[in-house]
Amino acid sequence: MEVLVVEKEAKQNPQLEQNKSDEPMSMIAKVVITGLFGGIFWSLLNYGTYVFNFTEISPNLVLQPWTVGDWKDRVLGQFIGIAVIGILSIGVALLYYALLRRFQKIWVGMAFGIALWAMVFFVLNPIFPGLKAVTELDRNTNITTICFYILYGVFIGYSISFEANEFAHEKKASLVNE
């Protein structure tokens, strides 16, 4: 009896907040959130490995070419670097979505992470004045950074591929139900 009263009330007042249904988030919004979260999360973990001397490379590396001053070498610079990496990661996630979203294999994400690592450490190396060549970095730094890039690539890749696959199934199911 109580359910019928609630349904009748919902039909009478569809403007009430409690009677509105949530609209699903768009796929691009999910990709943006995945990229932002992935960049911030993995950069925070990288900062932890930097603090504990597993790697010579800290998140503030991204600030080195564009900022002046000692502040970027302090904790504030590290956290601003983490935020910048999170924003840049949105672009990386959109790139993955545009090129590789249909592949739902872990190997694709791993390869994407390795490709990102190679791009940063070989192609973009001259941009970053504080980044030594790969041959000059110690073994712990190389292993740690490669592992982080692989894990980041798997996180971004598998999250986006899964969501794209789910989105396609929901779209197909809604077309069948109509």
Image: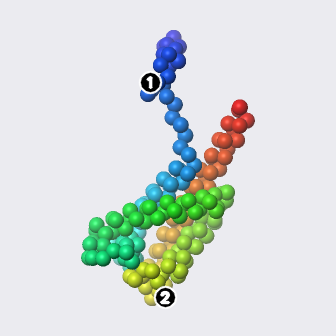
Q: Nearer the viewer, residue 141 or 91?
A: 91
Residue 26: % across, % down: 56, 46
Query: Image height check: is 23 above or below 33?
Result: above
Quick one: quadrant of the C terminus?
top right
Asked which secondary structure carries label 1, the reply is: loop
Visible residue check, residue 48: no
Mark 1 sits on what residue? 16
Q: CA distance from mark 1 to mark 2?
A: 64 Å
Asked which quadrant contains residue 140, the reply is bottom left
Residue 75: % across, % down: 28, 68
- Furthest toward the bottom, the residue is 136
Mark 2 sits on what residue? 135
In primary-sequence order, the first of circles 1 and 2 is 1
Asked which secondary structure carries label 2, the reply is: helix
Query: Image height check: is 4 above or below 93?
Result: above
Relative to residue 113, is residue 137 drawn left or right?
left
Q: Amino acid at mark 1?
A: Leu
Residue ID at (47%, 19%): 13
Asked which quadrant contains residue 70, the reply is bottom left
